[in-house]
Amino acid sequence: MIHDFGIVWSERDLLLSGLGNTTILSVLSAAAALLVGFAVTPALMSKQRLLAGIARGFVDGMRCIPFLLFAYIVYYGLPSFGIRLDNWTSGLVALTIYNAAYMAEILRGAWAAQPHEPIEAGVAFGFSNIGLFRRIVLPPLLLAAGPVIGNQMIQIVKDSAFLTIIALPELTHAASSIQSRHYVPFAAFITAVLLYWGLCLVIEAGVSSIDRLAAARR
Amino acid sequence: MSASDVLAILQGAVVTVTLSLAGILIGLPIGLALAVLRWADVPVVARMVAVYVSILRATPLVTLLLLLFFALPNIGIAIGPISAAILALVMNTAAFNCEVWRASLMNFPRDQYEAAQSVGMNASLRFRRIVLPQIVRVSLPGLVNEMSLLIKVTPVLAVVGVVDITRAAVRIGAETYEPLPPFLVAVALYAPIVFVLVSLQRWIERRQRMAEAAA
């Protein structure tokens, strides 16, 4: 057993590059999903029926289909429309669009729960549009939604593992290749599991520091 | 895409639903048992459950499934794709269910428990008659939410050769060189299953809010 872990250790470069790719994929698509989510949220809350309907359809649609199926549609289905993406681009696009729907719904919930008074006070002080959003609406919104966004980030890390199926060289894929090369299944996958755990603990630590910040501001 | 292809995807749907149901039905009581172990603060065991839940919640189902499928035979436990799939689903969903159950156990009013004690109910009777009926109600929305999450990770089971909806659709797409139609059939199958669960969750929440408002 110790010997097996020795083999995994000798392949640490492969494993670390997998961990790096998982981290890059997760961070990039979480940031992008949050941005897209911010664009979709006002549409969800819009008073224009058509716009709100389209945004609602997108969000509910994504929440009804499995991520893996969506990734397959992006990777294998889009070429039917003449859009051909490599596995990295498809992976990023799929992760981003899919999770943007969840982010939009999270932000909508947090936004709807925000008190109106600070915003009205901001308007009275002469803030408008972007300034109002950036200075008055955004900070408490992000603090309130922080823990749920953190949960969604953990979900993104776990979703990224599915992309091993379109041969993206992330952490699970690295563990799989070590296992098939040396036949050390337990050591290879347990190491991957522990690395995922570490990644999620880092995210949780980030969330609780945001929580402390929020508590200090209250 | 021919009628027999649609039939193949429908067969996949039977597999998806069966495996999901097995995962849900086995995972629910195990999650409850884990939650009770933590709630009762059984020494050492409670800590182990906490670590188990923390690790399992951070582990992608694909990784867990590959671990079980390849590592168990390695230590002499023979396991087929279907049993590996069910075991992975149960281990995964039990960890999430444990957290849902535990949250409602933690919020269970202490005075009710003490009242039951004072009328002479023993521990198992207290749990069955006083605690369980109430925490089931509180936990239900969270548990149903976890069920819809479970269905959405089942396509992963294909990596060990289980032919579910997604796998059947991919296979037909590869054979006909037209991947889109089978994918759309797959979407049309998943959407109603998840939609039913999400509606069920909303309905339970609404009913409970109304009951609270009336009380």
Image (cartoon, rainbow, N blue to C red):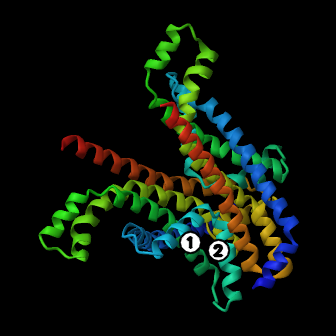
- Crowd around label 1: few <14 · some 14–19 · many ≥20 (10 Å): some
- Subunit that carries the residue with mark 1: B
x and y, in percent, of residue A190 in the image: 70, 73
Q: Which residue is mark 1?
A: B15
Indicate the amino acid at tag 1: Val
Q: Residue at x 67, y 92 (%)?
A: B76
The subunit carrying tag 2 is B
Image x and y of residue B170, in percent: 72, 63
| Quarter placement of the N terminus of chain B | bottom right
Can you say which quadrant of the picture contains the C terminus of chain B? top left
Secondary structure beneath disc 2? loop
| Residue at 26 percent of width and 70 percent of height | B127
Which of the two discs, 2 and 1, labels the residue nearer the N terminus? 1
Going by the image, does A106 lie left or right of A86? left
> Front-most of A97 and A33?
A33
Left or right? Give the position of B138 relative to B116. Answer: right
* Residue B162 - label: 2
Q: Nearer the viewer, residue B39 or A165?
A: B39
Residue B29 shows in the view: yes
For the point 50% across and 55% down, the residue is B194
The quadrant where residue A51 appears: top right
Q: How many marks?
A: 2
In the rendering, at what x and y percent does residue A69 appear? 66, 56
Q: State the residue lying farthest toward the bottom.
A: B76
